[in-house]
Image: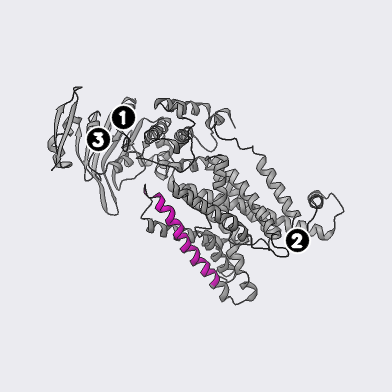
């Protein structure tokens, strides 16, 4: 399963959100996506998920144009966890996760025991089995994000796309969520706000004003010079207590 | 329903089967045929039915039989079809637009359908080549596009986090649209300068089942049955909108195509129904919300539950409209508004508290 962007550009109301971005996912990797607010992270993820068509350029899934694929075939391979998708419906956790089976069901092919099994496995993977019968609006922010990830896992995708999933969570839930995502045996693309969390990814892509400005190992992408240029902050890289590189930010430039 | 499907929602109260809806609806229709200015015993209604359906040959008073068969029965059946169709329209609009206040009446679809119908029937647009139903359909579609475009302009798009503003915007745009289309309807009727037709204005604004005869039954029942079937066919797609249009797209729903198809179907249903009974309000708002409490959020149950509840509600409302004031028939829209407006207020208050 390979997913590749070839010189993709997107503009909305004549404002360029992505400019000539080329990027190929490596099977099984966790690719982090970083950049200042408005750099085009969400737009890039929506392109990768196939729910936004770029004005120019190509998106290829296994060499085939993603746009040529039927929506349900695409959804059987690629799942998206949006930033804070909410509902006013009185939905139970199990019902919310069961929505992930939508691309596999049809008006005539109904719900089966196999679908129920996959929903149970997805709930177990995010440790939400005990919450299965709770109603959505009784959940905390961290629990909701876990349910969203379970819904995406119930899609049994080969590629999982996550848009700042740990946003607005407290630090404990942020770390737990990141550990969960790191451990998933899938190709993942994840937009991240916290650059130290981004250090845990296999590779990082950095966006600035819709352009891909860096792609590579985290410690190389997040160099102090590039952080000064793109984020406008003074930063230094240190060895953390666990041996992993750690960023320290001192002031805005 | 299979064991696995039951395991899906163990904490929901089980909706009492598929038989309760049709049973209650049949009872409501029989009551609609029995109750009225002259109250007839149920036996007379059943005997009249038997005489017409399989020539049972019961001795029934000819006037009573005429009242039951020619007036009350088609009226009750059309009321049921309208109730089901309007409730479904509300359900579909609420799901697809992700707006708890979406409703064919509040959004001006009914007003647009009225305008389209009077343009054809009273002003003679189309020169007899197009039917009143087609005019109503075109009017409903035009109203929908106008209201959604206006709401879109007011709320500045429908992106994330703008949901509350979008919900308010669609109501405000709906008020503007309804007022304009109702004014157009009044203008067209007044210009026709025919006292007989001018009295019909109330019909288009508040709805009435008074003129319903057997020839109106087939189109009303047909659009409602087709609409129900279409909604059931797309039940999983409607479910997938729970977390928004982008989430639905990510789940493999072709959002644009599905919205286009189901909203056109809604406009068609509303158009045909309004051309027969006028603009009846609040059914599409009240019934789906009530059914969400009783039957949960999944559309495999919500669609049939809303259709049956809407049908029963409107048959009951029609009975009440005939007996509330002795010797007078109120427009049925008065009854639905008396029930619906407070429910609308309750939904607003609940939404504000969220």
Q: Could you tell whether A12 is left or right of B60 in the image? A: left
Does the image show residue B100?
no
| Cα distance between the residues tagged 1 and 3 | 14 Å
| Cα distance between the residues tagged 2 and 3 | 74 Å
Determine whether B264 is above or below B136 in the image: above
Name the dominant secondary structure of the magenta segment.
helix
The residue singled out by tag 2 in the image is: B37
| Labels 1 and 3: the sequence-earlier one | 1
Quadrant in the rendering for residue A191: top left
Say if labels 1 and 3 share a chain: yes
User: Which residue occupies 62% across, 60% down?
Assistant: B277
Q: Which residues are magenta?
A: B158-186
Q: Could you tell whether A170 is left or right of B198 in the image? A: left
In the picture, the quarter occupied by the N terminus of chain A is: top left
Closer mark to the observer between disc 1 and disc 2 = 1
Q: Is residue B161 magenta?
A: yes
| Callout 2: SS | loop
Q: Chain of mark 2?
A: B
Q: Nearer the viewer, residue A86 or B137?
A: A86
User: Which residue occupies 59% across, 57% down?
Assistant: B338
Q: Chain of mark 1?
A: A
Determine whether B46 is above or below B7 in the image: below
The residue singled out by tag 1 in the image is: A172
| Callout 3: SS | loop
Determine whether A242 is above or below B133 in the image: above
- Judged from this view, the residue extending furthest toward the right is B59
Q: Are marks 1 and 2 in contact (CB under 8 Å)?
A: no
Q: Position of residue A174 (x, y in %)?
A: 31, 32
User: Which residue occupies 47% across, 30% down?
Assistant: A132
In the picture, the quarter occupied by the C terminus of chain A is: top left
The residue singled out by tag 3 in the image is: A194
Quadrant in the rendering for residue A72: top left
């Amino acid at each position: 399963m390979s997913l590749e962007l070839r010189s993709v550009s997107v503009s909305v109301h004549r404002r360029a959100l992505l400019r000539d971005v080329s990027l190929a996912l490596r099977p099984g990797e966790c690719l982090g996506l970083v950049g200042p607010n408005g750099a085009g992270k969400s737009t890039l993820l929506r392109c990768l998920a196939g729910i936004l068509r770029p004005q120019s350029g190509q998106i290829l899934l296994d060499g085939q144009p993603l746009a040529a694929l039927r929506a349900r075939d695409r959804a059987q391979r690629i799942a998206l966890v949006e930033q804070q998708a909410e509902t006013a419906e009185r939905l139970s956790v199990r019902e919310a996760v069961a929505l992930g089976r939508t691309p596999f069901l049809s008006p005539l092919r109904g719900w089966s025991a196999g679908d129920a099994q996959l929903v149970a496995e997805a709930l177990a993977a995010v440790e939400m089995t005990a919450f299965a019968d709770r109603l959505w609006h009784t959940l905390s922010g961290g629990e909701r994000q876990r349910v969203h990830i379970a819904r995406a896992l119930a899609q049994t995708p080969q590629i999982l796309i996550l848009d700042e999933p740990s946003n607005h969570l407290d630090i404990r839930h942020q770390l737990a969520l990141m550990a969960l995502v790191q451990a998933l045996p899938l190709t993942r693309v994840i937009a991240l706000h916290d650059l130290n969390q981004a250090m845990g990814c296999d590779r990082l892509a950095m966006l600035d004003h819709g352009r891909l400005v860096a792609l590579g190992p985290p410690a190389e992408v997040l160099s102090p010079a590039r952080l000064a240029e793109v984020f406008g902050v003074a930063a230094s890289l240190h060895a953390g207590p666990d041996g992993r590189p750690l960023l320290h930010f001192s002031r805005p430039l | 329903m299979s064991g696995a499907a039951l395991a899906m929602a163990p904490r929901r109260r089980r909706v009492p089967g598929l038989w309760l809806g049709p049973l209650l609806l049949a009872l409501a229709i029989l009551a609609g045929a029995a109750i009225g200015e002259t109250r007839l015993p149920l036996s007379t209604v059943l005997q009249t039915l038997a005489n017409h359906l399989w020539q049972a040959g019961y001795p029934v008073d000819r006037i009573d039989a005429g009242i039951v068969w020619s007036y009350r029965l088609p009226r009750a059946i059309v009321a049921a079809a309208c109730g089901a169709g309007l409730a479904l329209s509300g359900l579909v609009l609420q799901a697809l637009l992700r707006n708890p206040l979406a409703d064919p009446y509040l959004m001006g679809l009914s007003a647009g359908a009225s305008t389209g119908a009077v343009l054809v029937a009273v002003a003679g647009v189309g020169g007899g080549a197009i039917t009143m139903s087609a005019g109503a359909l075109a009017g409903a579609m035009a109203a929908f596009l106008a209201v959604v475009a206006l709401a879109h302009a007011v709320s500045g798009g429908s992106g994330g986090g703008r949901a509350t503003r979008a919900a308010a915007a669609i109501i405000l745009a709906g008020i503007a649209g309804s007022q304009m289309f109702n004014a157009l309807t009044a203008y067209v009727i007044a210009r026709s300068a025919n006292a007989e037709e001018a009295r019909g204005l109330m019909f288009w604004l508040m709805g009435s089942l008074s003129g319903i005869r057997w020839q109106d039954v087939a189109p009303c029942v047909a659009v409602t049955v087709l609409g129900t079937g279409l909604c059931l066919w797309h039940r999983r797609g409607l479910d997938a909108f729970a977390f928004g249009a982008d989430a639905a797209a990510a789940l493999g729903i072709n959002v644009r195509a599905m919205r286009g198809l189901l909203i056109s179907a809604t406009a068609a249903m509303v158009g045909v129904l309004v051309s027969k009974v006028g603009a009846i309000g609040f059914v599409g708002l009240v019934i789906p919300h009530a059914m969400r409490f009783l039957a949960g959020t999944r559309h495999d149950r919500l669609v049939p539950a809303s259709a049956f509840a809407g049908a029963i509600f409107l048959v009951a409302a029609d009975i009440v409209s005939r007996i509330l004031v002795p010797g007078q028939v109120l427009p049925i829209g008065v009854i639905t508004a008396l029930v619906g407006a407070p429910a609308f207020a309750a939904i607003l208050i609940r939404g504000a508290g969220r």
